[in-house]
Image (cartoon, coloured by chain):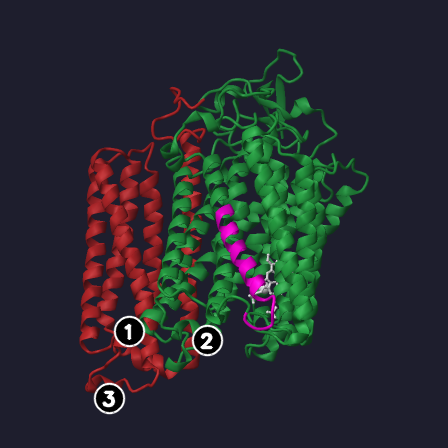
Chain colours: A green, B red
Amino acid sequence: MANASTSASSAASTPMKLKVKQFQPAQTPTNTYLTDEKGVWAWLTTVDHKKIGLMYLGSVAFFFALAGFLAIALRTELWTPAKTFIEADTYNQLFTLHGAMMVFFVLVPSIPAALGNFILPMQLGAKDVAFPRLNLASFYIYVFGAIFTFLSLANNGFDTGWTFYTPYSSDTNSAGIIWVTLGVFILGFSSILTGTNFITTIHKLRAPGISWERLPLNVWALYATSIIQVLATPVLAITILLLAMENILDIGIFDPALGGDPVLYQHFFWFYSHPAVYIMIVPGFGIISEVITTFSKKTIFGYWAIALSSLAIAFIGFLVWGHHMFTSGQSAVATTIFSFLTFLVGIPTGIKIFNWVATLYRGSISMKTPMLYVFIFIFLFSIGGFTGIMLGALSVDIHLHDTYYVVAHFHYVMMGGTLIALLAGLHYWWPKMTGKMYNEPLAKIAAGFIFIGFNVTFLPQFIMGAQGMPRRYYNYIDQFTPFHQTSTIGSYILALGFLIILYYLAHSLFKGKKAGPNPWNSRGLEWQSTSPPDFHNFSHTPVVIHGPYDYHQPMEEFQLGLAVEHGHGEEHLAADTTGSKAAEATIA
Amino acid sequence: MANHSATHPKHVHHHFVDSNQQFESAKLGMWVFLVNEILFFGGLFCAYIVFRAWYPELFTQAALELNTFWGAVNTVVLIGSSLTVAMAIRSAQNNQKRGLEINLLITILLACVFLVIKYFEYEHKLHLGIAPGTFWNPTPEIAAVLDHPKANIFFGIYYMMTGVHGLHVIVGIGLMIWLYMRARKGHFNSEYYTPVEITGLYWHLVDLIWIFLFPLLYLIE
Ligand code: HEM
Ligand SMILES: [Cu+2]
């Protein structure tokens, strides 16, 4: 039992007694991770998971703004059926860049690497992730990948769409494609390192008492995500490497002119990229589960159902990639199987939605901004999911494939799902990260703009798509003008919403009210430290004797920590008999 | 709590509770990384399977151009290096500084032998014009026996697989040199040999991949 204090799972079989003390987090901490080391250099070389998380957050926000700006340009171009203000070639490059940046630079790292990095170790009561230096390396690899992408712009750019389908991508003699594929290749490593780090952290760095059945659902979600990252990303890496070689050397594996097979490329690509959509959405599920209990003041309904459905999604998600290739000339048997499996993914997803709604039932709901985003999420993501099921139906997909219907579908899941969840999480943990509150009324107004703007932008796209408007087209026939114009107006409303967010978050940083350690009265472990937390997250080693959503238990019992701090575990195994209520905790 | 207390040995990073936790974490991390490596090569194996299923006669024909003898020698060399790396770990566990250094050196040496042989194999093929992609330009004699129209694809796969594997060998040599230098400074002992252990794991995988590559590429009947 030398490491009893670390591996709670081994403790699960034998209940053990720990000498504990109650630690009430200070209202206004004097020494926090933000004041601990100062200066730009200290930030750039930090191995603190919280700072790395914030650096990721900043970069993700930067790329989101950039790609969002491109989106506005694209929508503006589509105001008229013919040319509005940019050339067709530029248009092709812009939508490619928009898509590639949003997927690879924003959504994939957004929740895990930015919010997850900050929150995961805190929810485990750990001082850091298992490999802090790898964590920093992963950030710089990400930056490096981004630089490659920008270099590609300086070298003719690329206009293949974010999917880089061969043979177009292998035949186009543009140095830009080589640069961007290498960029994505590099980026993959950053994702892999994050995943590896999280899996190890979750297995090995849990504070005493955090058994698997007491893991916060956010941790379960990040665990499932990390598994997908580790299993899928290397396949993207090799695919992209082969594509780059195809481009540089003409090795002939994907290029039909040389005897290769372009459909093989599609299989490889989607073997990663379908699971990748779960890399994007599953962490969002985690955030929703956390926020929904906190603001319902109620235990989550169906803890295991939610936890395991994340793993089920991760698993089934690996078996459905073929639904992107219904029209690519797969065998009829393969298409039928893929279609069937695609329907199956709907089940674990549905389970989650039902459990969230059941959690709301009879809860005492407080409609704070994060909760507002949860409702927006449930609404938008359900639409995204249902339309996904429709696309999974063979005959329907033949008609809808490569139309705006698909565009609307994946924006409902990726933006309406992942991004809205990210906003929920950002507002939820903002006080923890910065120690400041934001302007609640303004936040609600912004959420309203985003909700309305989003629907005005993307609902018409379902209709257009169903009527045959193809995706990735620069011009269109007059009949679609009203839909396109509505969509464009929607995108402006959406942009306005984000500008408001930018404004009040910046304002909160400088002028925000002090948040205090636990403004939402959450039972989550991360809220039992000061806001902002100190360098080691907690001033003590937390001891956990309840699940993270046990709102029926008194708050003091969530504030326990080891009474004696030593380097080794053995000392504090002795039972304490002082008789005070919190002096002894049995962790089972 | 950041301070290293008396019971917190120097090699244990501040965020770990004890040496054991750090060791276990490093090992798990490496295993996860290896899974990731397997999938990385898995993509290549998958391409191999697809093309072999399509053009079985190409694979039989092209494999004749590969030198089975040197391929076999390289297999033995790598298996040998896996043995010495295992012995290096054993030495570290038993506090045998000298044994650790020698075993690491032999491993590095064997890895270099592997690369040298590989270099000559490549060199020979390039000389005959059996080059990847654009540079595919077999001499008339070769073209006479290697007359399959898709022959370039086999060698595209061959160069990718052995090339990526070769890169892993080079990385391994780098890691081993780093270990050797640390071993000389006496960084490792029975209490702390984590880097040796996890580099060993990595090296076994590199070896294992070659054990698959050899029959798949060289020994096709
Ligand atoms: C219930 C779950 C889902 C189902 C059944 C589903 C189904 C589908 C199908 C069948 C397609 C192919 C349409 C076509 O190209 O003709 C598709 C496309 C797509 N889906 Fe989903 N999907 C689901 C969830 C998601 C999620 C969660 C995301 C991302 C967060 C996502 C992102 C995408 C993207 C990006 C595309 C378009 C890919 C492209 O560029 O061609 N989907 N989905
Ligand atoms: Cu998919």
Cβ of mark 3 under 8 A from ligand 1: no
The part of the chain drawn in magenta is A61-83
> Share a chain, discs 2 and 1?
no
Amino acid marked by disc 3: Ala
Q: Where's residue A186, x and y in %?
A: 39, 55
Amino acid marked by disc 2: Pro
Q: Which mark is residue B144?
A: 3
Mark 3: few/some/many CA within 10 Å (<14, 14-19, 20+): few
Chain label for disc 2: A
> Share a chain, discs 3 and 1?
yes
Determine whether label 2 and label 1 are within 8 Å by CB: no
Q: Which residue is mark 2?
A: A262
Q: Residue furthest front?
A: A85
Mark 2: few/some/many CA within 10 Å (<14, 14-19, 20+): many
Q: Is residue A487 magenta?
A: no
Compared to residue A114, the image places residue A250 above or below, namely: below
Q: Considering only order in the chain, which callout, 1 or 3, is on the residue closer to the N terminus?
A: 1
Determine whether label 2 and label 3 are within 8 Å by CB: no
Element under disc 2: helix
In terms of image quadrants, where is residue A136?
top left
Mark 1: few/some/many CA within 10 Å (<14, 14-19, 20+): many
What type of secondary structure mainly makes up the magenta span?
helix
Q: Where's residue B141, x and y in %?
A: 20, 86
In terms of image quadrants, where is residue B110?
bottom left
Residue A172 visible, this angle: yes
